[in-house]
Image (cartoon, coloured by chain):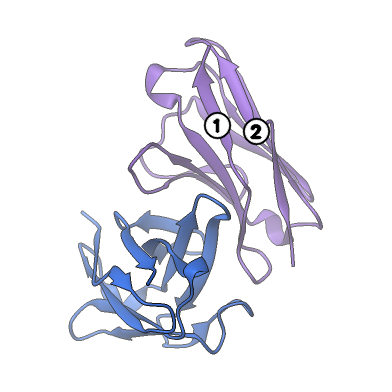
Amino acid sequence: EIVLTQSPGTLSLSPGERATLSCRASQSVRNSFLAWYQQKPGQAPRLLIYGASSRATGIPDRFSGSGSGTDFTLTISRLEPEDFALYYCHQYGSPPHAFGQGTKLEIK
Amino acid sequence: EVQLLESGGGLVQPGGSLRFSCEASGFTFNTYALGWVRQTPAKGLEWVSAIGADGNTHYPDSMRGRVTISRDNSKNILYLQMNSLRAEDTAVYYCTREGPSPFFDYWGQGILVTVSS
């Protein structure tokens, strides 16, 4: 069973800055089947990235994903006020599905 | 527009059972795999179950035997039956649609299930 560890737990940045979120898997994620979701308070998670680097429909191009094997990164190139939220990674390459514990992106 | 609308949650006593539903619209229901994911403050997001377009079901070992996922393609409804509920099952349960690979491209708004006496 794959365990995903996200870092940092909390990231404090200002609008306009670049955010780099990390997700490390306990073993290689098959086919880079890794997704990223954004969650705001009181809302369901929203798909941002799938297949490690493919943006979901309607997701702005300031969001990008990269990585393979055990190390994956979500980058937000220039933070907008609406980007401050919780972010989760998710591996779906090997059952069972697994989620990271989340990174909280907060306004500095 | 894809919509997933859960219903049927609420308060249930330990040891009890609950069945909740997810009514789907805005896509061809019988061609997509669907599933359930739950969220708690303690454990975060946790996969509960999935059912393929072909009706094949999938569960993590932690849920197997206590939960049953099913679908009614004539009504565009997904179901989750949970038995022998315990306090640790208290969570927000989300209905999900799977994309071309089993990531979750759409989520319902979530439904709260509270297991307490």
Could you tell me which chain the residue with mark 2 belongs to? Answer: A
What shade has chain B been given?
A: blue
The purple-coloured chain is labelled: A
Q: Is residue B102 visible?
A: no
Is B24 positioned to the left or the right of A88 in the image?
Answer: left
Could you tell me which chain the residue with mark 1 belongs to? Answer: A
Tell me which amino acid carries mark 2.
Gly
Check disc 1 and report the residue beneath it.
Answer: A104
Q: Position of residue B113 (x, y in %)?
A: 35, 66
> Taking B81 as reference, is A58 above or below it?
above
Q: Position of residue A57 (x, y in %)?
A: 38, 44
- Residue A9: mark in rendering: 2
Residue at (33% x, 42% y) in the render: A42
Residue at (37% x, 61% y) in the render: B94
Question: In terms of sequence position, does the residue under pointer 2 or pointer 1 come before the other?
Answer: 2
Most foreground residue, B20 or A78: B20
Q: Position of residue B78 (x, y in %)?
A: 30, 77
- What is the quadrant of residue B112 in the picture? bottom left
